[in-house]
Image (tube, rainbow, N blue to C red):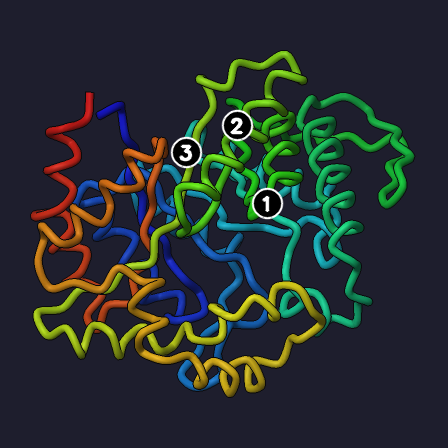
Amino acid sequence: MNSLTIGYKTCHEQYQPDRLLAHAILAEEYGFKTLWTSDHFHPWAHTGAAGGFAWTWMASAAERTKKIKIGTAVTAPILRYHPAIVAQAFATLAYMYPDRIFLGLGAGEALNESPLGYAWPTPKQRVEMLEEAIVVIKKLWSGNFITFRGKYYRLKKAKLYTTPRKPIKIYVAAGGPKVAELAGRHADGILTGPGGLKIFRELFHAFEEGAKKAGRKPELLERVVELLVSYDEDYDKALKSCRFWGGSMLPLFFKYDISDPREIEEHGKLVGDKALAEKWIVATKADEHIEAIEKYVKAGFNHIYFVSSSPDEKKFIKFYGEKVLPYFRQHSK
């Protein structure tokens, strides 16, 4: 098994910021190396949901932890965030916490943009906006005066006077070959979710081709997967705890202009227990979790982080820290 980085995700949709902070501190204590955090305006559900602001929370988490690397999964630098503001925010975080901040980027969902009055772009437009935004962000991190006139964004003699002390890694979320190729050309890693081996092969091929086009070495880049997990001694309890995320499992909410969490939650109720169990790693024993995770390591991922919807999140962190992470540390070079 090649070197593997294991991370934990704090989801602002499911917990208020103070509870997430407690989870983050505990995750570092139990051996997680990266801390990914959602960056949404609206959550994926209405009942019992939360909606903290990721960038503010990241500063608190960085201050309360020591070494764990912190970043977003993911920020959409297309509408509600001008890419220059993304560049400034993360440059400041990286200046304050050198070598501990990374930036996950994606083409976004309507639930984060439409509530602020923006017209929801087509998929093609969002991909174009994402690529142009990455170019803007990188140019500004150079610390130079930048004038830029793109299809979607403009800069006029713009300069960041606080720049990162160390380079900030960029990860791009990709669900298809086109964005995967984009990630290969511009990012330090590709990020995707659960899926089959055929899908991963297509993504990795496009990712590697993009890297080669840009004169980069694919083997030096990261392949990151977000895994959905739930743990409890009681299987039914662990499965029921995933119900909160039912709406996020429906592809239409990623494609179309639907942004009301109440509507998303109602549609999510149509997702059956079988579908939840197929998407999520729901298990009561450590070896069951390990077996499910190993499939992704063998598929070629060298960075895995977990979205847990366990009934007791602190118990999950301790369980993984004591029973699951040691296995992968032992078997990783």
Q: Residues within 10 Å of mark 1 (few under 14, many from 20)?
A: some
Which one is closest to the eye, mark 3 or mark 2?
Answer: 2
The three-letter amino acid code for the residue at tag 2 is Asp
How far is mark 3 from mark 2, CA to CA?
A: 15 Å
Disc 3 designates what residue?
A: 100
Q: Quadrant of residue 2?
A: top left
Q: Nearer the viewer, residue 127 or 296?
A: 296
Question: Along the horizontal axis of the image, is 138 left or right of 330?
Answer: right
Left/right placement of residue 115 relative to residue 49 reads right
Residue positioned 63% across, 32% down in the render: 181
Identify the residue position indicated by label 1 in the image. Answer: 176
As shown in the figure, which amino acid type bears the numbered disc 3?
Arg
Q: Quadrant of the N terminus?
A: top left
Secondary element under disc 1, as helix, strand or loop, is loop
Return the x and y of residue 133 as percentages of the image width and height: 73, 40
Residue 188 circle label: 2
